[in-house]
Amino acid sequence: MTEELIQDAEHRMHGAVDALDHDLSAFRTGRASTALLDRLQVEYYGTPTPLAQMATLAVPEPRLLTIRPWDPGALPKIEKAILSSNLGLTPSNDGQVIRLTIPPLTQQRRDELIKLAAKRVEEARVAVRNVRRDVLHHLDALDLPEDEVHRVKDRIQAMTDKHIKIAEDHGDRKAAEIREV
């Protein structure tokens, strides 16, 4: 029973770190990345559709994204979705391909992004600690010998420390990437 608790905790903590990694990958760092468009939904035949499911996304240059829709009739809808998103990018359409030029970040915007990344890291830390709290609560409900409880608590704490360290490393890496000019 305790092994199941430990495995569940490991899985949930890993999920919290993965969610952080996914969140941080969508941050604009002055370099083009298709991850910027991961959450973009396009109204296509009355249905919100992820952009990646209706077009080929590419990064031909460090500051340029290209979007080549499989249906050229979708170009205006894709442009509209980009303009209405909070990406801050202006699409350029040549009739077949949409080009998104990624402008360099201002120092003020870099500072905002670093603060936002730190906030996301803190949310991941809280999520990992909540998993620990939940598992310890379940552990207390079990009728186990005291030495077994201490052994499991030590393993859970070590696992918590490891996942918090991984989350902080992800945040530090993203902050360094954002600071890079």
Image (cartoon, rainbow, N blue to C red):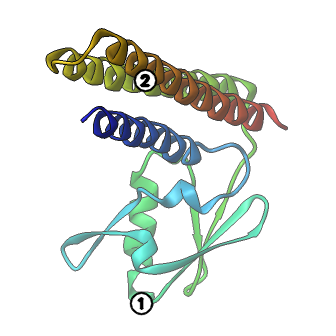
Tell me if mark 2 has few (under 14), some (14-19) or many (20+) residues whose alpha carbon lies within 10 angstroms of its own.
many
Callout 2 amino acid = Ile
Callout 1 amino acid = Asp
Considering depth in this image, is 25 or 16 the residue closer to the camera? 16
Residue 100: percent from left, percent from top: 63, 63
- Residue at the image point whose x is 28% and y is 18% from the top: 136
Tell me if mark 1 has few (under 14), some (14-19) or many (20+) residues whose alpha carbon lies within 10 angstroms of its own.
few
Q: Where's the C terminus, which quadrant?
A: top right
Is residue 90 something one can see in this rendering?
A: no
Residue 11, by quadrant, is top left
In the picture shown, does residue 60 fall above or below 3? below
- Residue at the image point whose x is 70% and y is 28% from the top: 172
Q: Secondary structure at mark 2?
A: helix
In the picture shown, does residue 63 fall above or below 77? above
Residue 53, by quadrant, is bottom left
- Residue at the image point whose x is 48% and y is 44% from the top: 18
- Residue at the image point whose x is 37% and y is 72% from the top: 77
**Labels 1, 2: front one:** 2
Residue 46: percent from left, percent from top: 18, 74
* 65 to the left or right of 63: left
* 122 to the left or right of 65: left
In the picture shown, does residue 7 fall above or below 35? above
Considering depth in this image, is 106 or 58 the residue closer to the camera? 58
Q: Secondary structure at mark 1?
A: loop
Q: Where's the N terminus, which quadrant?
A: top left
Q: Give the residue pinned by disc 1.
A: 71
| Residue lying furthest top | 146
